[in-house]
Amino acid sequence: MDSGRVIFVFALILQYFSCTVSFVWTGEINLPQGKVRGKVDWQNGYNAYLGIPYASVTKRFQEANPAPKWSGTMFATNGSINCNQYSELLKTPVGQEDCLVANVFTPIRQNNDLLPVMVFVHGGGFDFGSNSNLLFNPKYFIQKDVIVVTINYRVGAFGFLCLYGTEATGNIGLKDQLAALQWIKDNIQAFGGNPNTMTVFGESAGATAIHYMITTGKHEGLFDKAILQSGTVLMPNKIDPNPVKTASMVASKMGFNSEDPKELLEIFQNASTDEIIKASRVDAKNQPLKLYLFRPCVESPVIENKSFITAYPKQLVDSPICDTNLDIILGYNNKEGIKQAGQYDSNGLKNLNSTLSDIIPENILFTNESEKEALTEEIRKFYFKKGIDHDSLIDYFSDTVIMYPSFASGNSLLSSNIRLYNYFFKYDSFRNLYKSVSGLPQKPGATHADELFYMFDPLVFNLVPLPAVSPTPEDLKMINTITTLWTNFAKRRRPSSCTTADWNRSKKGDLQFLQLDSEVKMIPLPNPERLLFWDRVYKRYSSL
């Protein structure tokens, strides 16, 4: 990245702060931890309480301690705290280990009615991301009279190092999220929120995390409404079957050779945060499925009341969910695979002809090499009979990474009598910022995470410099549509109302989708022949 573009990004950030330095303090909020004041953000129309600790990290790779207390009044204005990770923007490690904070946003209002609460869990492949208000500015939601809370959780090795039989039990980042939800449940009433009307929504890894909570029963007592945007536990790369091997590989890049969990724990405990982050980096060019190393794991040994994930995703999804009070929105974008396909250059496309088996979903289990070869040829005939190009790869990655896992997860939820609403986002404009940096910006449609920019009003893009994109009248219409549907769901469990399109619930054997585009309408299951192809594959082979 050239220095001029970096300066431009920081100019945008400085411009943002210069526009918001003139503010007044909110009234004082009394929490069990201490007193807190936020700032009244007149420009965005909300009170912002930024960087409030919901727990504290005192020991690496272990569960967090209860929220810290303070004396006096905390002035909660730091909305850009990061957990340790690599910054693509700065090309360097950033963040801190004690990073477990929540940002709370409330409407500027006078009445005392308790408001519905919406908690957002960010994505990032369990490897990066934060709750920064520079990216997740919730002003569009706040205009609908709800409270929004965004949370941090540990990512990468710091959140997902999994070493069997050691103190690094794994899934610490998921346990951070549970601690955050409990803190919100216990404290949100002080901010004017209703602790009994909580909706949790997340995108990509954030949605996967929420789905893990639901399939393990960890959600009970915390929330009964969830929105899963482009993420479920059945995504092929959202469980690590060999976490000790992963740790050993990263340790070798730091100069150590060991496969012993206890030795590896000592190596990671003694390494600096920068050493761990740099050793965890992967070049995704022409291998987008290998981008993120540390992921959730099946914990072993199982510790009662402590372990989070105790079975592989397929087993979790196949087990009935006993909580019949759940309402869920689940959906995805029409060209999810642009994200992965855009990582391939011309040489990468050419090489895929001989390495096609490398992109078979890694959660499929084969008993011998001939089975893998047979499936490779079946995939070639179904997706690539005219050759491998970006368009065919977009369909392939859309189906295998997001769409089929969501299809299978939705059918499973319906089997447990969960009330399910499905959506299909395909709106396209210059505000589709993730597509614009995907390597394939000219392709029509919406790629992974593009919908976020019709929910939040970002001021800086986390990976590469981009100017703020002012919404057009059509964009504002889509923004209003999504935030109205999402907040209706948070308020009354039913997303549609007299002012929106009817959104019918899906039924067993009949998935119905609300298509979010210039015309909002109900449609049948998109691309059924492609999803049924994978349904046959997964029924033929065992999977994780």
Image (tube, helix red, strand yellow):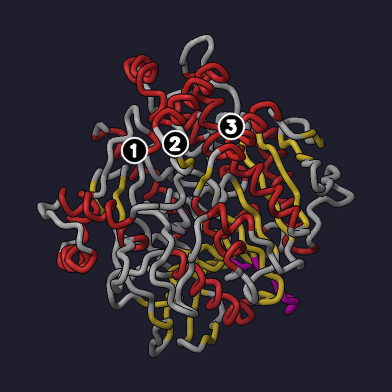
Give the extent of the magenta segment: 105-117
Callout 1: few (<14), some (14-19), or many (20+) C-alpha neighbours within 10 Å? Answer: some
- Residue 118 appears at what percent x and percent y? 63, 63
- In which quarter of the view is residue 360 placed? top left
Residue identified by numbered label 2 = 467
* 2 or 3: tag closer to the N-terminus: 3
Q: Are marks 1 and 2 in contact (CB under 8 Å)?
A: yes
- Local secondary structure at mark 2: loop
Q: With respect to residue 179, does 260 lie above or below? A: above
Q: Are marks 3 and 1 in contact (CB under 8 Å)?
A: no
Q: With respect to residue 283, does 485 lie above or below? A: below
- Local secondary structure at mark 3: loop
- Local secondary structure at mark 1: helix
Label disc, if present, on residue 457 of the rendered structure: none
Q: CA distance from mark 1 to mark 2?
A: 8 Å
Residue 532 in sight from this viewpoint: yes
Q: Residue at x 39, y 60 (%)?
A: 80
- Residue 480 appears at what percent x and percent y? 71, 45
